[in-house]
Image: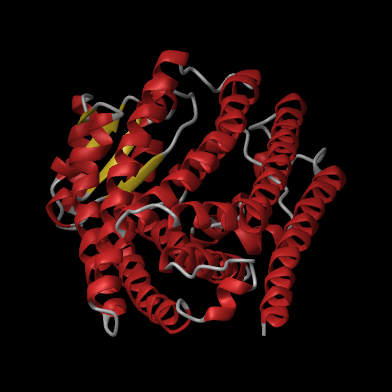
């Protein structure tokens, strides 16, 4: 049985590496073949020099992603086959409650993974993004963000892990249900608190300042029966020149957030079109749908973990003589992560459908697709977006329709 489990792991793990590499190479080759051609919808919007920067930016990001993926794969194998047996053996020899063992176990792994990822984050932020004129963050702010993120993540994940372990320990036959119930309430609470408690720790959020824009926003939202008090601008320009807008929160904390960089670089009509798109996500209840999907899949996932986490071959496959349940949680999560990679296109397809629905809502609210088209073109130019993704790569990874396809979709609506 151990051999079968090992073969299954290697099949999923190596399959993920190969498929990820194939997609990256297809995307790069497609860009080499078509990257010098300015798409028809961008004629007069970008020149050859801008297109060349878009291509170079995609190349550089792809190279960095390849190296980071390779480092993560090597680290995962090292942890599984070298560190894991030693760490579990050391913890088993300590006179500690199993919940404390679990917290130390996942804490050590989190520190190793976090430290290993820092060099890539530094290179991306201070070298690659600086090279293309995006990064504006200081070392002080970067370090402050890192410390805050570590503290918040440790507190939240530590709490969730401790509660999960308590359920496993004291409710061994039904822990999966209570863990799912706790996870559901925890996620809902987190989504409710994030916009008003966590996000303000990193950025300053304030109502839209431009009075003319505020009046336009009020009129736009009145069309769908919403109040404009949920529209905020955020000082993201202190970190990056990238432009964006997003929808966050649930219930009374739901809000639409516009980057200050977007407000500074786009026309009034384009900002309203982007806002109308985010209103589309709001009205179509896309976050609620995602939440329901996550709750349903987590129930299935936790029940599956319950069925296999105490299975002895799971531990012996990776050389573990002891069978602490926290090690089993890690091993099952690795299998599920490898398998889940191949189901990524399902989630991506759902997200692309949501984006089309939001684009359609933007067109309905503004009466024309042209402002949204102009906004997308400017966003692509300002963010150096890849205009020539390979269809397979976009199908597997993209949460938004490829830009040319998206613009053509909007043009057809007019």
Seen at 73% across and 40% down, the residue is 67
Q: Nearer the viewer, residue 219 or 163?
A: 163
Q: Is residue 380 above or below residue 204?
A: below
Q: How many marks?
A: 0
Q: Is residue 260 above or below residue 159?
A: above
Report whether residue 282 is seen. Answer: no
Q: Would you say 137 lies left or right of 395 here?
A: left
Residue 100 visible, this angle: yes
> Where residue 371 sits in the image (x, y, percent)?
44, 42
Picture layout, residue 151 above or below residue 50: below
Quarter of the N terminus within the rendering: bottom right
Left or right, 137 with reference to 179:
right
Judge left or right: residue 36 versus residue 293. Answer: right
The quadrant in which residue 301 appears is: bottom left
Residue for point 44% across, 55% down: 93
* Residue nearest the viewer, comparing 265 with 289: 289
Colour basis: secondary structure
Write the residue at 28% across / 48% down.
156
Q: Position of residue 260 (x, y in %)?
A: 35, 26
Where residue 261 sits in the image (x, y, percent)? 41, 25
Residue at horizontal 37 percent and vertical 73 percent from the top: 298
Asked whether 51 or 332 is in front, the reply is 332
Up/down of 70 relative to 22, above or below: above
Q: Position of residue 50 (x, y in %)?
A: 70, 27
Q: Is residue 358 left or right of residue 21?
A: left
Q: Nearer the viewer, residue 41 or 152?
A: 152
């Amino acid at each position: 049985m151990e051999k079968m489990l090992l073969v299954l792991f290697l099949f999923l793990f190596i399959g993920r590496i190969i498929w990820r590499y194939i997609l990256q190479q297809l995307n790069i080759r497609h860009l080499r073949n078509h990257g010098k051609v300015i798409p028809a919808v961008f004629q007069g919007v970008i020149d050859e020099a801008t297109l060349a920067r878009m291509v170079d930016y995609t190349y550089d990001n792809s190279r960095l992603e390849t190296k980071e993926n390779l480092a993560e794969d090597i680290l995962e194998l090292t942890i599984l086959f070298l560190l894991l047996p030693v760490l579990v053996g050391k913890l088993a020899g300590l006179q500690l409650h199993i919940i404390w063992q679990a917290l130390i176990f996942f804490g050590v792994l989190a520190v190793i993974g976090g430290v290993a990822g820092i060099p890539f984050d530094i290179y991306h932020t201070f070298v690659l993004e600086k090279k293309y004129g995006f990064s504006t963050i200081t070392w002080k702010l970067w370090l402050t963000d890192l410390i805050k993120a570590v503290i918040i993540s440790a507190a939240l994940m530590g709490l969730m892990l401790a509660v999960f372990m308590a359920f496993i320990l004291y409710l061994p036959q039904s822990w999966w249900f209570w863990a799912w119930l706790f996870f559901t309430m925890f996620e809902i609470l987190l989504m409710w608190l994030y916009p008003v408690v966590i996000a303000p720790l990193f950025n300053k959020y304030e109502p839209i300042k431009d009075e003319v824009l505020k009046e336009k926003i009020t009129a736009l939202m009145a069309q769908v029966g919403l109040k404009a008090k949920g529209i905020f601008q955020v000082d993201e320009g202190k970190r990056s020149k990238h432009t964006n807008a997003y929808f966050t929160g649930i219930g009374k904390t739901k809000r639409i957030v516009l980057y200050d960089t977007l407000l500074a670089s786009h026309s009034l009509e384009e900002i309203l079109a982007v806002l109308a798109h985010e209103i589309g996500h709001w009205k179509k209840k896309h976050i609620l749908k995602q939440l329901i999907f996550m709750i349903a899949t987590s129930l299935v996932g936790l029940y599956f973990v319950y069925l296999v986490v105490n299975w002895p071959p799971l531990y012996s496959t990776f050389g573990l003589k002891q069978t602490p349940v926290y090690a089993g949680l890690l091993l099952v999560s690795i299998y599920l992560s490898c398998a889940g990679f191949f189901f990524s296109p399902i989630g991506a397809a759902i997200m692309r459908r949501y984006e089309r629905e939001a684009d359609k809502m933007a067109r309905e609210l503004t009466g024309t697709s042209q402002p949204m088209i102009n906004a997308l073109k400017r966003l692509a130019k300002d963010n150096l977006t890849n205009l020539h993704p390979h269809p397979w790569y976009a199908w597997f990874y993209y949460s938004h329709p490829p830009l040319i396809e998206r613009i053509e979709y909007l043009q057809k609506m007019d």
